[in-house]
Image (cartoon, rainbow, N blue to C red):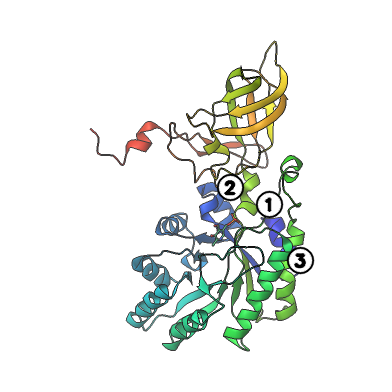
């Protein structure tokens, strides 16, 4: 996170990072990024309450997402969190809250939506290409106690630096249109960035994914060119999930069985696709074999599959390795969307160990038990 922030701050010093809780909300990780100055970027009441439980100051919480209850909006706004409004309906709910609490100033941003080259139109945010965005801005600012502090945009599907330059430039132009000569307090370009990864994964991308420095050049440069470094320069916020957390975890499991079926070598492991890539993407994560004591370990191309009864439970489609029952296998880059998306399907979730910079090991999460899963069911 420090490296990402440094790359951006070298161009636009007022850059902040939002920790996308949905990507990985292991408390120890949230506490670490918060201590480094990151906002808690949350998208539900559950995530909002988790951030508070982890002692995030309400003013350091960004509340995003397409569905927020009126109660959550009221709680967050009154506590001083920044709420990025996603629809005209939400605008009206915020207005009602503002009318009821005339002595409060409510902090909001507008999540914007516009067409980007090669991408299907997103369903999130308020259409900036028609009248809706201007309507939202004027409805919010009419009453006097809602501060529209900035613009938020998150467009998944294109990780290229060129796309980020384009979307940032477009957001700066939109800010000029809405805010006139007084710049907004922030421009938040969302997440969607690629992160650090081993070469074996990088090689599977059609085009090499940009580095942090390339993203910084693409995003922070249009900000710097428009706003300079003066005290009124808006804060640039980036909220990478995948781009920050992919490489914070490795998943380790064991080879339980090997077999040959129709000429293909299969290694069945004690993990599942839901542990290493529950988004079911087509990438093969880099995998390393840690041998146990063994006499033979055939060198072959192995299909590595998991403990569930789904045919799709393939952790690696073909890895060339010496491998035998009892060996451990280690999957790299399993930090994003894994812990949060692992379902209680067929088996419980494993423990997560945290390794300190000095090598000290602690438990970041104990292994889940059947009792954990059953607590919400009324059984005797
Ligand atoms: C608003 C917002 N910010 C940040 C992220 C993180 O995205 P990614 O993991 O692609 O960086 C998401 C993901 O959906 C999002 O919706």
Q: Which residue of the protein is positioned furthest toward the front in this rendering?
A: 262
- Is 282 on the left-hand or right-hand side of 137? right
Is there a contact, CB below 8 Å, between mark 3 and mark 1?
no
Q: Which numbered marker is on residue 336?
A: 2
Disc 1 residue: CB within 8 Å of ligand 1? no
Q: Quadrant of residue 48?
A: bottom left
Residue 97: x percent and y percent?
A: 36, 77
**In the image, is residue 68 above or below residue 171?**
above
Q: Is residue 119 visible?
A: yes
Would residue 204 be found to the left or right of residue 119 on screen? right
Q: Is mark 3 within 8 Å of ligand 1?
A: no
Q: Residue at x 65, y 21 (%)?
A: 265
**On the image, numbered disc 1 is attached to which residue?**
195
Q: The N terminus is located in which quarter?
A: bottom right
Badge 2 crowding class, 10 Å Cα cut-off, few under 14, some 14 to 19, many 20 or more, is many
Q: Earlier in the sequence, mark 3 or mark 1?
A: 1
Pinpoint residue 102: horizontal percent, then vertical percent: 36, 84
Residue beneath disc 3: 217
Mark 2–mark 3 Cα distance, whole angstroms, equals 24 Å
Going from N to C along the chain, the mark reached first, 2 or 3, is 3
In depth, the one of 289 and 231 nearer the eye is 289
Q: Are marks 1 and 2 in contact (CB under 8 Å)?
A: yes
At mark 1, the secondary structure is loop
**The residue at label 2 has a CB less than 8 Å from ligand 1:** yes
Residue 378 screen position, x and y as percent:
25, 39
**Residue 74 horizontal side relative to residue 81, left or right:** left
Looking at the image, residue 189 lies above or below residue 322: below
Q: CA distance from mark 1 to mark 2?
A: 10 Å
**Quadrant assignment, res 37:** bottom right
Left or right of residue 241, residue 5 in this image: right
The answer to whether residue 363 is seen in the rendering is no
């Amino acid at each position: 996170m420090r490296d990402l922030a440094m790359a951006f701050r070298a161009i636009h010093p007022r850059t902040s990072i939002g920790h996308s809780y949905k990507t990985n909300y292991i408390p120890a990780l949230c506490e670490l990024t918060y201590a480094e100055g990151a906002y808690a970027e949350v998208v539900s009441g559950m995530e909002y309450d988790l951030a508070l439980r982890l002692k995030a100051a309400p003013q350091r919480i960004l509340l995003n997402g397409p569905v927020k209850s009126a109660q959550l909006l009221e709680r967050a706004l009154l506590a001083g969190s920044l709420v990025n409004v996603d629809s005209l309906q939400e605008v009206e709910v915020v207005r009602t809250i503002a009318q009821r609490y005339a002595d409060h100033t409510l902090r909001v941003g507008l999540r914007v939506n516009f067409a980007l080259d090669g991408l299907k139109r997103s369903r999130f945010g308020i259409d900036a290409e028609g009248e809706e965005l201007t309507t939202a801005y004027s409805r919010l600012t009419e009453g006097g106690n809602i501060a529209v502090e900035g613009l938020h945009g998150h467009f998944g599907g294109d990780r290229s630096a060129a796309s980020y330059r384009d979307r940032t430039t477009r957001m700066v132009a939109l800010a000029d249109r809405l805010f006139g000569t007084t710049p907004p307090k922030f421009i938040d370009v969302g997440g969607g960035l690629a992160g650090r990864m081993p070469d074996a994964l990088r090689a599977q991308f059609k085009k090499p994914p940009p580095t942090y420095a390339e993203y910084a050049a693409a995003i922070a440069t249009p900000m710097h060119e428009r706003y300079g470094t003066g005290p009124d320069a808006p804060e640039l916020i980036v909220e990478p999930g995948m781009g920050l957390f992919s490489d914070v975890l490795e998943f380790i499991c064991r080879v339980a069985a090997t077999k040959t079926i129709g000429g293909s070598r299969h290694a069945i492991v004690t993990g599942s696709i839901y542990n290493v890539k529950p988004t079911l993407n087509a990438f093969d994560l880099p995998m390393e074999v840690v041998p146990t004591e063994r006499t033979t370990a055939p060198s072959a191309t192995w299909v590595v599959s998991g403990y569930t009864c789904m045919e799709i439970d393939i952790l690696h489609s073909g890895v060339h390795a010496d491998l035998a029952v009892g060996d451990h296998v280690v999957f790299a880059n399993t930090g994003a969307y894994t812990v949060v998306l692992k379902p209680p399907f067929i088996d419980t979730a494993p423990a997560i160990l945290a390794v300190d910079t000095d090598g000290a090991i602690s438990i970041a999460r104990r292994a889940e038990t059947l009792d954990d899963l059953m607590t919400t069911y009324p059984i005797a």
